[in-house]
Amino acid sequence: MAEATPPPSAPSATQIGVDSWVTESDERRLHRAGAWGAVLRGWERLPPPGKLALVTPAIAVPFIPIVSSGNLFNYGIFILLYALLGLGLNVVVGFAGLLDLGYVAFFGFGAYTFAFLSGTHHEKGHVFTHHWPAELSIPVAIVLCGVLGLFLGSTSRRLLGDYLAIVTLFFGEAFVVFTNSADPYGVTNGSNGLANIDPLKFYAFGQHLTIASVRGYYWFLLGCVIVVLVVLHFMSESRTGRAWKASREDPLAAELMGIPVNRLKITAFIFGAGIAGLAGTVFAAAQTGAFPQNFSTQVLILIYAVVILGGVGSLTGMLVGAAVIIASNQVLDSTSPPNLQRVLFYAALIIGFALMFRSSWRKLAVVAASTVALGFAAHAIASAAWPRGVHGSVTSGGFLTGAIKHWVLLPTNPGRIADYVYVLVIVLAVSLTQLKGWWRVALAPFVFVFTAFLWENLLIQQPAVTRYVLFGALLIVLMAIRPQGLFGTARVEIA
Amino acid sequence: MSEPSSSGNGAASEPLLQLESVDTFYGPIHILQGVNLQVRSGELVCLLGGNASGKSTTLKTVLGIVRPRNGTVRFEGEDVTSRSTSYRIGKGIAIVPENRRLFGPMTVLENLQMGAYLQGGGTKEAFDRVYSLFPLLHERRSQLAGTLSGGEQQMVAMGRALMGKPKLLLMDEPSMGLAPILVERSFEIIQQVHESGVAMLVVEQNANVSLSIADRGYVLSTGRLVLEGPAAELREHEDLRKAYLGR
Ligand SMILES: Nc1ncnc2c1ncn2[C@@H]1O[C@H](COP(=O)(O)OP(=O)(O)OP(=O)(O)O)[C@@H](O)[C@H]1O
Ligand SMILES: [Mg+2]
């Protein structure tokens, strides 16, 4: 008996067979040298509230001048809105590990509920007039979203991956169809949506408070984001937060510990739905209405992009993710100058290629040199054999006009050719990921040249499409640099 | 409370855990066939059997991860056959699962807290007890469980199961993957925990060691109990010796 239990301070009686270097892994971890390394180390040591305290103003402050100059949806509000949506989705996807593809419907449901309770709407012979104060309508909208989440969560009872994804995707689509046309009572006013609703009106501390300015919504949203962040922070550190994590890592083991896995998943679902609902109410108030097209799949993709980029499971990441995604989305919108898009496009392309060959400078140099050579060679051959191929004009050139004119083939009427090249580029890009070593080096210049051709002859003329193409490229590049997202934590796991 | 009539050896104490003619299926496959098994308070019972004989399934049936199609599961005399896993664990059952199943990306401390989920994350007393059994866990409390060695992981799994102060501890092959010295060490700890008053149902391939510390044993063969009795008797049993003890 005495032998069986060495006292805690006894010299390592049980050290035989124990792998000692893991204990000192912290001391043995390789650190990046120099000032940047010191900054990184300091950042990693910072507790989450500290990170938050640094990140929030860093993101919020630069937008204050823009917002106060009245550029309504362009920056600050959108960023905060998507940060809020990202935080909600993060509970569902990041904390509980559920793939919810109907998330945007909760956002819409919150917006519609608020809009319905804050104005006069008539259609199909019905007139609805409600002018609820916001301190009532916002909680009601949040609770209704939560109830809807409960309903959806419990119908897909087993909440298994694919099954849940399909059910929620269907739900999201059904919501758009319903608001657009299928609603028999005119509650949602079809494709016209609910317009001209009241701004946010509160009655608090004996006085009426109305938020009607852009600046007002900005501060109000910032407050919402901070409150949600704090609540979620404490939640993720709580028993429930850890149980979510455990259920995500190993549902059976969690079940064996007595954790009610399914109930916790539904709780996460409800939480996410409620946060989306809150975002919806502020959104509806700020744009004084709710319309079906506000809640399309594109919005869902943006929210997912925020979560993935920010780092699934990280709270601070959502703020940064939202700032990066929304800012780039705004910069790339259809009104921004095409040359800006062009610069970003080539930058993403070059960075992507550089990353692909980052392990070998030799290969990278070969690819770069042969890419340049290939462009000029193709140009030379075309001007001899196929003059039409070089007589097109550069779309909205800017300072790159000269280079493009002599390096990219610009046919006078690209039409069909560009479509074929589109398919070819996709095939080549896929092949590129499959090839290894010098085969990849050999193919890469062709991919680059054809992609440039595609951009100059087709994509740049269609800003609405290019925005998403660029967006995808940006995400891919960032994911290549940090697969775990900006704020996710990479860990060494020896299972 | 119904007093079970089928008490085997006429021992005084009422069974803590009782399976009564349990039939468990996985879909159409009949795994456990009419299993009758008891564990009394403070008893250490071992369950032996070859691969795929249904040992793990028996433990899953006890916890309600699978539900028997026929038969009843009683804990402290209460029929828990249709109760949730969570309910049964709250009543005082804990398990060291097959292959340990730690939460790899969580720290040792968090793993221990999960073991006491239904008790709100663990009292200081529970932590003290676990840390005195496994001083190493205190030292490594902020290390990620997935980065521990197999032997260390076994300690976490046992510590985690003890965090909820169970009355009955189920163990599925606690010696799996351990070096001989650690097998011995872990059986010492099992015995120590047992002596502190926790009843145990231990599933083992290592019949020799487990019978040496058990009070009683059962032998399962393709879903049926083919042998049962006091551990000392089983150790002398001709067939068992041939099949498991290798002598
Ligand atoms: N979820 C399941 N679905 C279908 N069959 C299963 C399932 N789990 C176990 N089985 C089958 O039930 C039988 C008994 O499995 P069980 O895990 O109880 O064996 P065991 O006695 O613990 O074996 P081992 O010593 O190898 O762990 C096996 O044939 C197994 O394939
Ligand atoms: Mg087994």
Image (spheres, coloured by chain):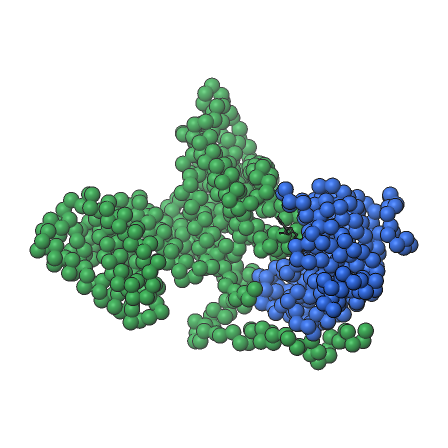
Q: Colour of chain A?
A: green
Q: Answer whether residue A362 is visible to the viewer in this image.
A: yes
When the figure is inspected, residue A185 is found, relative to residue A372, above or below; the finding is above
- The picture places residue A427, in percent across and down from the top left corner, at 30, 51
The front one of A482 and B244 is B244
Total number of numbered discs in the rendering: 0
Residue under the point 83% across and 62% down: B233
The front one of A335 and A22 is A22
When the figure is inspected, residue A129 is found, relative to residue A5, above or below; the finding is above
Residue under the point 43% across and 71% down: A36
Residue under the point 68% across and 69% down: B137
**Location of the C terminus of chain B (image quadrant):** bottom right
Residue under the point 81% across and 73% down: A1
- The picture places residue B244, in percent across and down from the top left corner, at 72, 63
The front one of A284 and A45 is A45
Query: Image check: A139 left or right of B17?
Result: left
**Location of the N terminus of chain B (image quadrant):** top right
| Farthest residue, direction left | A384
The front one of A333 and A15 is A15
- The picture places residue B230, in percent across and down from the top left corner, at 84, 60
Which quadrant would residue A358 be assigned to in this image? bottom left
When the figure is inspected, residue B35 is found, relative to residue B204, above or below; the finding is above
Query: Image check: B157 left or right of A21?
Result: right
| Farthest residue, direction bottom | A11
Query: Image check: A416 left or right of A170?
Result: left
Q: Which chain is blue?
A: B
- The picture places residue A47, in percent across and down from the top left corner, at 56, 64
Q: Answer whether residue B169 is visible to the viewer in this image.
A: no
